[in-house]
Amino acid sequence: MKDVSRRDFLKISGTAAVTAAVASCGGSNQVGGDLDPNGHHTGEIPKDKMTYRTNPTTGDKVSLLGYGMMRLPNKVVKSEQDGPQEEEIDQEQVNRLVKFALDHGVNYFDTSPAYCRGFSEQSTGIALKASGYDRSQYFIATKMSNFSPSQFPFEEGVKMFENSLKYLQTDYIDYLLLHAVGGGGLENLHQRYLDNGLLDWLMEQREKGRIRNLGFSFHGEIEVYDYMLEHQDQYHWDFVQIQLNYVDWHNGNNQNPLNPDGEYLYNELAKRGIPAVIMEPLLGGRLAKVPDHVVAHLKQRRPDNSVASWAFRYAGSMPNVLCVLSGMTYMEHLEDNLRTYCPLEPLEEEDVKWLEGETASLIISYPTIACNDCKYCMPCPYGLDIPAIFVHYNKCVNKGNVPESQQAENYQKARRAFLIGYDRSVPKLRQADHCIGCRQCVAHCPQNINIPREMQRIDRFVEALKQGTL
């Protein structure tokens, strides 16, 4: 597979795989049934049609759909009337989702010590153990998430790894990643992994079998990415996790000039035969919640497919992709993605060009903020709910509820929708007007968003709406 170009792969698989999908799914990979209000099919999902890719290094048969354990469902444990609202992971729901995923062929679960306020690994371990599946039937991916200088010392890295094994209830990690390599440049890379001897130790653990595959996830400065790949003969990366989607393929992150095009990241791996694991195929959900006119644009081409399925088919159609991660908080997300990959119907070359060109241009033309809701910026020392503010703003942009002036035709309706939705989505004490510009969040943002600047812009917009001075 690694010697086949993306164009050749699409030509080869675009007939054979489509024929198989049609035969097994009645004419479309979106298994039959009615559509729910979100455009997701409601028919039965097959348990034996998952598309798998083979890791050329280990021979692992990995499900093309991977479960990202970063956005797990929560439940309220303390209401506003008793004080600030508090939430914790809804373990019962996580158990249900993980079991359903395993039952339908998903066998790759990606977590981190940094996810879900530090509780994702523990929750993942509980759910996998409760599933009843043998440890050999699934792959666990976790990360060395030593972001803070206090975590740079060698002993702290070893402690983090050992804790991961304990929380995940396992004695080995299938896929271990150096987390978010690139942020802070080469100096940060040396401090976290090289100068302290931590990477050498992790490579030793790979030799001992406590780590089965060693790789890294990339966010940030391209010189770091190039450095890691230039030393492939030394490090022998088994896989690399990159951000890839049809908007960023040619455009990079249009709000962050440091982030390179997805095309460059992917091709550098493909030419070395290093399998790619894909994160953010939906750009933190933004490619599933596009403006109404983009929805119509996608539906016109293929009415029976969900908006999100286009992004997942795009990422999955790349021949050097081992696994595509999705943070599936709710069952409907999981079910929709299963229909896309059970089995995958690879995109035709014409569809690829249409997504990378015309469709990407339509989405880029709307001024959403490039937040992926990863929550790396949290907690804010001054209490702001940074991701919730950005999510609400982006949602309103997509729905046309961010009027440019009072002369806009839908000004009153949009004004009401934005302000009422803002108060419902973000408690008043956690809104943008409480940002003091301390910039502690900026260094943690993998998208390199200037968060204080965006907070000031949103706060000015909110005040203008409230005062009627827009």
Image: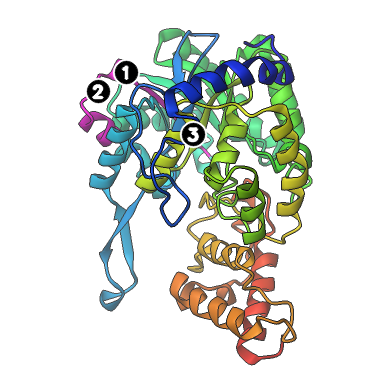
Where is residue 163 drawn, in percent x and y? 35, 32
Where is residue 105 drawn, in percent x and y? 36, 25
Say whether disc 2 or disc 3 marks the residue closer to the N-terminus: 2
Asked if 470 appears above or below 247 in the picture, the reply is: below
Of residue 389 and residue 142, the one placed in the foreground of this image is: 389
User: Quick check: is 59 in the magenta stretch?
Assistant: no
Write the start and end of the magenta stretch as one range. 125-146
Q: What residue do we see at 67% from left, 51% from top?
A: 297
Asked if 13 appears above or below 104 in the picture, the reply is: above
What residue type is disc 1 on?
A: Gln
In the displayed structure image, the side of residue 268 where residue 344 appears, left or right: left
Residue linked to disc 2: 133
Q: Identify the element where label 2 is drawn.
A: loop
Callout 3 environment at 10 Å: few (<14), some (14 to 19), or many (20+)?
Answer: many
What residue type is disc 3 on?
A: Thr
Q: Identify the element where label 1 is drawn.
A: helix
Residue linked to disc 1: 137
Foreground mark, 1 or 3?
3
Q: Quadrant of the C terminus?
A: bottom right
In the displayed structure image, the side of residue 42 where residue 432 appears, left or right: right
The alpha-carbon separation of the residues under discs 1 and 3 comes to 22 Å
Say whether disc 1 or disc 3 marks the residue closer to the N-terminus: 1
Callout 1 environment at 10 Å: few (<14), some (14 to 19), or many (20+)?
Answer: few
The alpha-carbon separation of the residues under discs 2 and 3 comes to 24 Å
Q: Determine whether label 2 and label 1 are within 8 Å by CB.
A: yes
Q: Determine whether label 1 and label 3 are within 8 Å by CB.
A: no
Residue linked to disc 3: 340
